[in-house]
Every structure is written in structure tokens, then in C-alpha cells.
Amino acid sequence: MHGFLGIDVGSVSTNLVVLDQQLNVISQVYLRTQGQPIPAVQNGLRQIRATLPQDFTILGVGTTGSGRLLAGVIAGGDVIKNEITAHAVAAIQYCPDVQTVIEIGGQDSKIIIIRQGIVTDFAMNTVCAAGTGSFLDQQANRLNIPISEFGAYALRAVSPVRIAGRCTVFAESDMIHKQQTGHNLPEIIAGLCTALVRNYLNNVGKGKDIKPPIMFQGGVAANLGIRSAFTEAFGQEVIIPPHFDVMGAIGAAILAARQWEQTGIKTRFKGFGVCEQDFRTTSFDCQGCANCCEIISISVDNELAARWGGRCDKWNCSLIG
């Protein structure tokens, strides 16, 4: 068997996917990054390897996410692309006529506008956590409710309370006030889900030409309360793809497959043995000019493997190989 590997390294989760040559998902792994992207990628590769036949051959590797350069060095990436491109490619694969993609992850949220299969506009919110999954995690933990049950609580609400959702601090204090005044838990959680959606539309979606079909992906798409809030806000159902939580990795794998089909170039994949190698990173500030670029270096078994971060090529060296 042959296939393609996609790796999406984010601030909260690290996701790996293997597609067959027909671009069907045959294996996927969703892990918490826990502030350690290198061990997360290595652990993900171990888990993926355990699910594949011994004679399975990786034909190409794509990486994306905020840690895409790091993942490209570790695994030997053939294609290294930003999250917007990867998520758009995956969305179009599952719904060719999709026009709007909503993606909410752990630390950021995105909106991607697509027309006739081409990305025409996008926006990201990385400033305030009120519209992201980490905020929901925090509140679920504070309320002592498993995050997996958070959305189900919201669906029980008869009359969701209105919670200020423009800021995490205000949202939390407002939620506490609503508890103290006697509102029940389902009403508060439903209000929180509505506030997150309102925050998203007022910030990330502001000024965007949102048209159906609308696809909702990212880890937060698992939350039934957020799904319901988006459906109510748009007045129509939103599409939830079958592998909504690993769409970035799927998009990266599809991009690797396209490159392999177009060029036939042998993959740079270093093999699953990289799970056992010792990767270390260091950084320093270049004093060569007023930019003072922060240069990142990564070594493998005490040998320099790659360097990046400069605005010029003074320090940069091969990311992959």
C-alpha cells in the first residue's frame, strides 16, 4: 500500500493523517501539543506507524500549522504550507462548492472565503482567546464539566442568558454574575456558546461576504452547543465534515499528493525512525542589522539540521532534506 502523510502542528493540538492514493483517510491521530511540538510530532508518528501495515510506503509528506517548519524538519516535509491553504484545500475536497469555511482551533480562529474553488479572502483572530477553544476548555474546567459534555449541556437550555463575549475577562466575570443571580448551568453554557459565536462574527467575520455552503471545522466543531449557535446565527445548517478535527492535516496530505502526482519526485520523508532521534532547538538574536531577527536552530543528534527566522538568508539553511 502507498499513501501520503499530513502533519498539522498547532499551539493546542498536533494532528497527523495518512491518506491513500484515492485521498481517503486510512489513519488519523489527534494529540495535545502541551507546549512541546517536537515530542508531540514524534509521538504522533509512533501512533500512526502502529496503525499502518509494515509494507506501507509514504509517497509524500505535507506539513502545516504554526509548527509547520519544525514538523517539516523532523519528518522530512515535501510541502510546507500555511493553515489557510491547507484548510481550504481540505474543505474543497469534501464539499467542492463550499463558499465559506469557519475554523476554530485552540488558540486562534479563521474564516476563509472561497469562490469557484479559489480562496478570495480570509481573516484570523489571534489577539483575544474569547473566540477560541482554549476559552471553552477553561470555562468547562472552572464549571467542573468535561469539555466533551459541554455542548450537550447547552442544548438543554430553554432560554440562554446573554453573556458579554467580547473579552475573556468580561465573559468570565459576567458568567459568574449569572451563576450568582440563580441562572441554571445549561442556560449559562448556552449563553457562553452564543457569546463565542457572536464574538467570532463580530471580529473574524466582520465585513466578510459569508455565503453558503458554510463549512465548520477545527476541534471546536465537536461542540454541539457551538454548532447550534452557528446554525441559529446563519439561519441554516452548517456542514460538519467527517474528519473536522484534523482538516488541516488532511489538506497538507492532499497538497503532498498533488505535488507527487505532478512531479513524481521522490519524497524527502525520513522514515518513522525519526521518532527515536534526539531533536533540540536553540535561538539567538542576529545583531547584523537593526531588524535583530530571532534565529531558530534545530539539531538532530547534535548535528545542525536547519535554521530559519531571518528576513534575509544570512543564517537560513535548508529546512528539509
Image: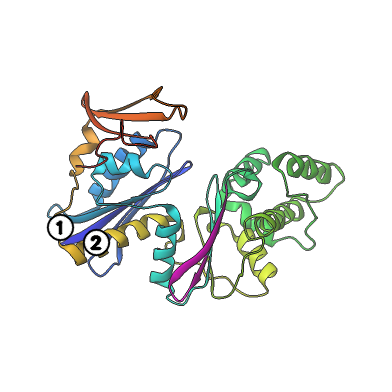
Q: Is residue 120 magenta?
A: yes
Residue under numbered circle 1: 265
Quarter placement of the N terminus: bottom left
Q: Is residue 184 above or below residue 227?
A: above
Image spot of residue 287 (x, y percent): 41, 22
Between 308 and 130, the residue placed more toward the observer is 308
Instruction: Tell me which residue sits at (18%, 39%) in the image.
Output: 273
Circles 1 and 2: CB atoms closer than 8 Å: yes
Confirm whether residue 252 shows in the render. yes
Q: Looking at the image, what colour scheme do you see?
A: rainbow
SS type, badge 1? loop
Around disc 2, counting alpha carbons within 10 Å, would you say few (fewer than 14), some (14 to 19), or many (20 or more)? some
Between 131 and 258, the residue placed more toward the observer is 258
Instruction: Tell me which residue sits at (31%, 36%) in the image.
Output: 313
Image check: 260 left or right of 151? left
Kind of residue at badge 1: Ile
Instruction: Please state the extent of the stretch shown in magenta in the rendering.
Output: 113-125
Image spot of residue 155 (x, y percent): 68, 62
Quarter placement of the C terminus: top left
